Image (cartoon, rainbow, N blue to C red):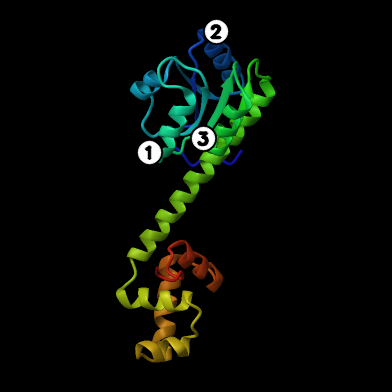
Amino acid sequence: MTASHETKSPTVFVIDDDQDIREALQSLLRSVGLRVELFASVQEFIDRASPDGHGCLVLDVRLPGRSGLDFHDDLIKESMHLPVVFISGHADIPMSVRAMKAGAVEFLTKPVRHQDLLDAIYLAIERDQARRDGERSVAGLHAGFESLTPREREVLALVAAGLLNKQIAAQIGISEATVKLHRGQVMRKMQARTLADLIRMADKLELSRPKT
């Protein structure tokens, strides 16, 4: 798995109304060194779970009160990105299709093979870590962009649009030497090692995309 940059190791949140299954899953997951939190219902998870859960959710489809599928829909609507592995003892094809179309990592039928479940959980945790790493990277780019002067931002946008130094100089009315100076400052503040790096950063910031 990708090395975590989180201060806390990932947690597998298990929501299942069957106590025996919850405890069996807890034993399995702890045996491979994973942190586990158990919940008997969606409401219990909402009341007790960390608001910034890092890891993944193992979710039974049929639960008292809010169903697992409906709760998954709620998570998506609220832009909560915790990856979900569904498990169900009463699965059918429409259920599994709905879950996978909604972005579930896996849909497994009880009794679940231990290795299948572990594989799905590790994949879900990797996806969660990759998303978090991506969010941190974009946050760093925004911080770098905020440190630029208005003129440096202007130069960055024109570089991202593909203009040469002499074209930028002509467009904004400064010397080519001054453009090079600004461009060097932009590279330093954005921590870009190459022009290609800088253009990729600008693309992530949507500076090189046409305005609609």
**Residue 180: x and y, percent?**
44, 83
Nearer the camera: disc 1 or disc 3: 1
Say whether marks 2 and 1 touch (CB < 8 Å).
no
Q: Quadrant of residue 108?
A: top right
**Residue 183: x and y, percent?**
43, 78
Residue at (49% x, 67% y) in the render: 192
Q: Earlier in the sequence, mark 2 or mark 1?
A: 2
Q: CA distance from mark 2 to mark 1?
A: 31 Å
Q: Quadrant of residue 71?
A: top left
Q: CA distance from mark 1 to mark 3?
A: 14 Å
Q: Give the answer, above or below, for where 2 lies relative to 60.
A: below
**Residue 28: x and y, percent?**
61, 17
Q: Amino acid at mark 2?
A: Asp
Q: Earlier in the sequence, mark 1 or mark 3?
A: 1
Q: Secondary structure at mark 1?
A: loop
Q: Amino acid at mark 1?
A: Glu
The 10 Å Cα crowd at callout 1, few under 14, some 14 to 19, many 20 or more, is few
Question: Which residue is identified by label 1?
Answer: 78
Q: Earlier in the sequence, mark 3 or mark 2?
A: 2
Tally the marks.
3
Q: Residue furthest left?
A: 150
Q: Residue furthest front?
A: 94
Q: Is residue 35 left or right of residue 65?
A: right
Q: Quadrant of residue 97?
A: top right
Question: Which residue is identified by label 3?
Answer: 83
Nearer the camera: disc 2 or disc 1: 1
Q: Which mark is residue 184?
A: none
Residue at (55% x, 40% y) in the render: 127
Q: CA distance from mark 3 to mark 2?
A: 24 Å
Q: Considering depth in this image, is 16 or 204 the residue closer to the camera?
A: 16
Q: Secondary structure at mark 3?
A: loop
Question: Which residue is identified by label 2?
Answer: 20
